Image (spheres, rainbow, N blue to C red):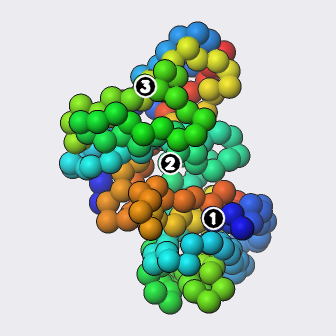
Amino acid sequence: SAVISQKPSRDICQRGTSLTIQCQVDSQVTMMFWYRQQPGQSLTLIATANQGSEATYESGFVIDKFPISRPNLTFSTLTVSNMSPEDSSIYLCSVDTNEKLFFGSGTQLSVL
Amino acid sequence: RKEVEQDPGPFNVPEGATVAFNCTYSNSASQSFFWYRQDCRKEPKLLMSVYSSGNEDGRFTAQLNRASQYISLLIRDSKLSDSATYLCVVPASGGSYIPTFGRGTSLIVHP
């Protein structure tokens, strides 16, 4: 299993500002996933973060809007840039250990 | 067919009832499957794994039907605390490293 510490747990932000979300894993993992979950919807993958290389973004998500850092095998950050109300969502980081997914506790973001 | 499909519900059942959810998948090469439970505004948490024909854990039974490409989750003697969204997840396979999530089935257990 894996234990993931994610912060902040929630934030209320003004439009046009940026928020950086951090995830710390208690073990070394090759890939970390960043998801967005809008109200009433399932999880949508934003990008996959590998240590030592650029993140791989899914269709509809770009690095300028969601820059990701992965400085080592236990840590990653996701920044939501130039926020708008449409970015209000829950953001989750996740790791895959023997096919099982473990999630951070999520960041509930509200943009005014 | 979508990769992973679930009936979104909500399933509204009384305490003590038995309820079952299905999840269909399109990738016949998938070997393992998972059910996750997600409470409102919380992260998904692993509930059960399904690797072969099925798996039972207390009041919960997960079954796999490879011929028809679906997995099911059966909850017996429902409790109020079972109220949540249940997500069906198919791990990455066939060269992809990305797991596939169903939309989730909402369960409401009422007194």
Three-letter amino acid code at disc 2? Glu
Q: Is residue A28 left or right of residue B58?
A: left
Of residue B46 and residue A43, the one placed in the foreground of this image is: A43
- Residue A14 lies, with reference to residue B77, above or below; the image says above
Q: Amino acid at mark 3?
A: Pro
Disc 2: host chain: B
The residue pinned by badge 2 equals B43
- The one of A58 and A14 positioned closer to us in this rendering: A58
Within 10 Å of disc 3 (Cα), the crowding (few <14, some 14-19, many 20+) is some
Q: Residue at the location (53% across, 41% down)?
A: A58
Q: Secondary structure at mark 2?
A: loop
Q: In the figure, B14 relative to B98: above or below? A: below
Q: Chain of mark 3?
A: A
Give me the disc on residue B3.
1
Give the residue displayed 48% in from the left and 38% down from the top.
A57
- Tell which subunit mark 1 falls on: B
Q: CA distance from mark 1 to mark 2?
A: 22 Å
Residue B71 - label: none
Specify few, some or many for label 1: CA neighbours under 10 Å numbering under 14, 14-19, or 20 or more: few
Name the amino acid, label 1: Glu
Point out residue B8 in the picture as x, y percentages from the top left corner.
74, 61
**On the same chain: label 1 and label 2?**
yes
Which of marks 2 and 1 precedes in the sequence? 1
Q: Between residues A42 and B109, which one lies in front from this camera angle?
A: A42
Residue bearing the label numbered 3: A67
Single out the mark in the foreground, 1 or 2. 1
Q: Residue at x 55, y 33 (%)?
A: A61
How many angstroms separate mark 1 from mark 3 (CA)?
28 Å
* Residue A8 image position (x, y, % from top left): 42, 28
**Image height check: is B11 above or below B55?**
above
